[in-house]
Amino acid sequence: MKQLWQILFSCGRSPAKRSLSTRPIKRQRNAQNLIQAAIIALAIGTLMLVTSPGRALQVQVVPNNPQLGDTLSVTVESDTPGNTAPAVSLGKRTYSAFPIGNNRFRALLPTTPLDKPGVLQLRISDGNETRLLGLPLRGRKFPTQSIWLPPGKDQDLSDFEFDRVDAFKKLVTPEKFWSGLFLKPNNGPITTIYGVRRYYNGKFAHDYYHRGVDYAGAYGSPIIAPAAGRVALVGQESKGFVIHGNCIGIDHGQGVESIFLHLSRILVKNGEFVKAGQVIGALGGTGAATGPHLHWGLYVNGQAVDPSPWRNKRFE
């Protein structure tokens, strides 16, 4: 730009001394130079208006090469007046974006084993500008296992139980309660990973995948909150939770929830705020369980995602 303005400036000057015979030719050349320089300046000025970082909508997606089950963290930087949250959409659904400081917002988008691998079409808009992003979603192989439930445990989910759990999973509390990495909720070894497909009593469960991680800890061993949050669900087998058994649901805020199933004891109350690492219950075998274990499910905006990345990577 400095050279360009030097050209524009020099073309506007006239030599101190000119001969009468060369003045018309030089004036014509100067005029042509001015026109060419003006055209260049106009082109560069237009390019600056289009790509100016002061107005461009900045978007970052992590991870940039996700696989099925990953949580997508979409960070948007926008200088829209009023600090209005941008709209972040994937397919036909729009997800809430929350401020994280310095004109930046963050939305969490879930992916599951039932999604199709391919290019995800993200749409981000702040009211003044819209960006369309194509993000490749990698496939992932999930194992298959057979589960044989004892008599009386192979019931359909009751409306009462379904309605309570479904309402819990849809919570999108504006506050963010968690901080840092999520903790392991039980010291037992993992026996069933996230995403496993299953046959129940010999029948394949279509549109089903294991929506969490199972820990085979000792019966009665402590279960801790993996992150801070508010208890938003307490279910008891004796009061109709025949599938989940005794269970606890913790709202971590901003559409992130943990649910713990098959407990032998519940040590917290609905509405109670818990800290990361706090003992909330004890491992058991209530509900639709073939034996004592803990099922930990992590939900993001209503969909069960793989909890493992949340224990290895910060979602701030």
Image (tube, grey):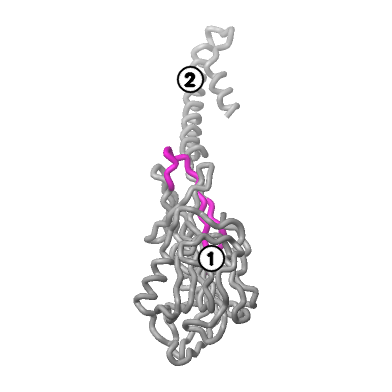
Please tell me whether residue 77 is drawn above or below residue 250 in the rendered image.
above
| Callout 1 touching callout 2 (CB < 8 Å) | no
Decide which of 172, 306 is in the foreground and name it.
172
Residue 212 percent coordinates (x, y): 53, 73
Q: Is residue 114 magenta?
A: no
What's the distance in space between the residues labelled 1 and 2, CA to CA?
A: 61 Å
Name the residue located 54 percent from the left edge and 72 percent from the top edge: 296
Name the residue located 51 percent from the left edge and 20 percent from the top edge: 29
Q: Is residue 47 visible?
A: yes
In the rendered structure, which amino acid carries the disc numbered 2? Ala
Quarter placement of the N terminus: top right
**Numbered disc in front, either 1 or 2:** 1
Decide which of 18, 253 is in the foreground and name it.
253
Residue 218 percent coordinates (x, y): 63, 81
Query: Magenta-highlighted stretch: main secondary structure?
Result: loop
Q: Which mark is residue 152?
A: none
Name the residue located 50 percent from the left edge and 35 percent from the top edge: 48
Say which residue label 1 marks: 70
Question: Which structural element holds mark 2?
Answer: helix
In the rendered structure, which amino acid carries the disc numbered 1? Asp
Say which residue label 2 marks: 31
Q: Earlier in the sequence, mark 1 or mark 2?
A: 2
Q: Which residues are magenta?
A: 60-85
Q: Is residue 67 magenta?
A: yes
The residue carrying pointer 1 sits among few (fewer than 14), some (14 to 19) or many (20 or more) residues within 10 Å by Cα, namely many
Q: Quadrant of residue 316?
A: bottom right
Q: Quadrant of residue 314?
A: bottom right
Residue 51 percent coordinates (x, y): 49, 40
